[in-house]
Image (cartoon, rainbow, N blue to C red):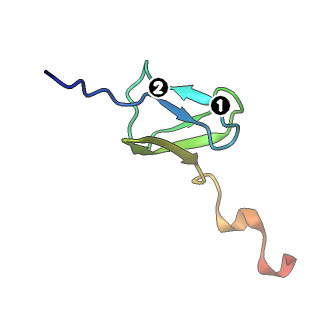
Amino acid sequence: MMKANKRTTVALCPECDEEIDFSQAKPKVGLKFSCPHCEANLEIISIDPLKLDWDDSDFSDDDWGSDEDW
């Protein structure tokens, strides 16, 4: 009996918890995209299992203001 090696092609958006289907695309670690449901900037952080996280590469420490603001 042969085992099918089928990877999960659906992942949950960490922002809106909606399923994102990758069955039409080949997901790769580091792939950055916007959630089709809530438009959050996301990144694939793991393939097996397929996991997503927020893409924070657009932000720098300057985006948060200085320590003096606190």
- Residue 27, given in percent of the width and then of the height, sits at 40, 33
The residue sitting at 65% across, 31% down in the picture is: 18
- Say which of 1 and 24 sits in front: 1
On the image, which quarter does residue 20 sit in? Answer: top right
User: On the picture, is 27 further left or further right than 41?
Assistant: left
Q: Quadrant of the N terminus?
A: top left
- Residue 61, given in percent of the width and then of the height, sits at 67, 68
Q: What amino acid is found at the position of numbered circle 2 in the picture?
A: Phe
Q: Is residue 17 above or below residue 62?
A: above
- Name, please, the residue furthest toward the right: 69
- Name, please, the residue furthest toward the top: 24
Q: What amino acid is found at the position of numbered circle 1 in the picture?
A: Glu
Q: Residues within 10 Å of mark 2 (few under 14, many from 20)?
A: few
- Residue 25, given in percent of the width and then of the height, sits at 42, 23
Q: Residues within 10 Å of mark 1 (few under 14, many from 20)?
A: some
- Name, please, the residue furthest toward the bottom: 68
The residue sitting at 31% across, 26% down in the picture is: 6
Q: Secondary structure at mark 2?
A: loop
- Say which of 4 and 28 sits in front: 4
Residue 22: which disc?
A: 2
The residue sitting at 41% across, 30% down in the picture is: 8
- Residue 37, given in percent of the width and then of the height, sits at 69, 27
User: On the picture, is 3 further left or further right than 9?
Assistant: left
Real-space Cα distance between discs 1 and 2? 13 Å
On the image, which quarter does residue 48 sit in? Answer: top left
Q: Is residue 26 above or below residue 45?
A: above
User: On the picture, is 20 further left or further right than 60?
Assistant: left
Q: How many marks?
A: 2
The residue sitting at 64% across, 26% down in the picture is: 36
Which residue was labeled with disc 1? 18
